[in-house]
Amino acid sequence: MSTVASEHLRQFIERIETLEEEKAAVMAQIREVYAEAKGSGYDPKTMRAVVRLRRMESHKRAEAEALLETYKAALGLQ
């Protein structure tokens, strides 16, 4: 591999490493927020589910909720 290509590769690797460090820091902050919410009486598992639902597009969320209702009805959970 040429010196130029090696340098280019090294730059990519260093950028990825920096982003991984930043990601770890953000994940730690998110864990702290969930812990704080739990200390205030909220359920982190339910909060994670809400965050996941809010991330979904509305039509995908409606589709998932309808499917869940169908499965619950089939299993007599309603």
Image (cartoon, grey):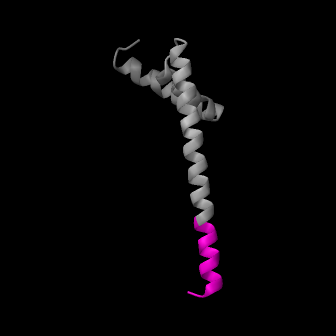
> Secondary structure of the magenta portion, mostly?
helix
Q: Which quadrant holds residue 12?
A: bottom right
Q: Residue 10 appears at what percent x and percent y?
A: 59, 72
Total numbered circles = 0
Quadrant where the C terminus lies?
top left
Q: Which quadrant holds residue 6?
A: bottom right
Quadrant where the N terminus lies?
bottom right
* Residue 33, above or below 77: below
- Is residue 70 shown to the viewer in this render? yes
Q: Residue 38 appears at what percent x and percent y?
A: 51, 18
**Residue reaching furthest bottom?**
2
* Residue 31, above or below 40: below
Horizontal placement of 56 versus 48: left or right? right
Query: Which residues, given as a range, are shown in magenta?
Result: 1-13
**Residue displayed at 46% across by 25% down:** 68
* Residue 5, above or below 53: below
Horizontal placement of 15 versus 43: left or right? right
**Residue displayed at 58% across by 46% down:** 23
Horizontal placement of 31 versus 7: left or right? left
Q: Residue 70 appears at what percent x and percent y?
A: 44, 23
8 falls in the magenta region: yes
Considering depth in this image, is 45 or 54 the residue closer to the camera? 45
Q: Residue 16 appears at what percent x and percent y?
A: 59, 60
- Is residue 63 shown to the viewer in this render? no
* Residue 8, above or below 64: below
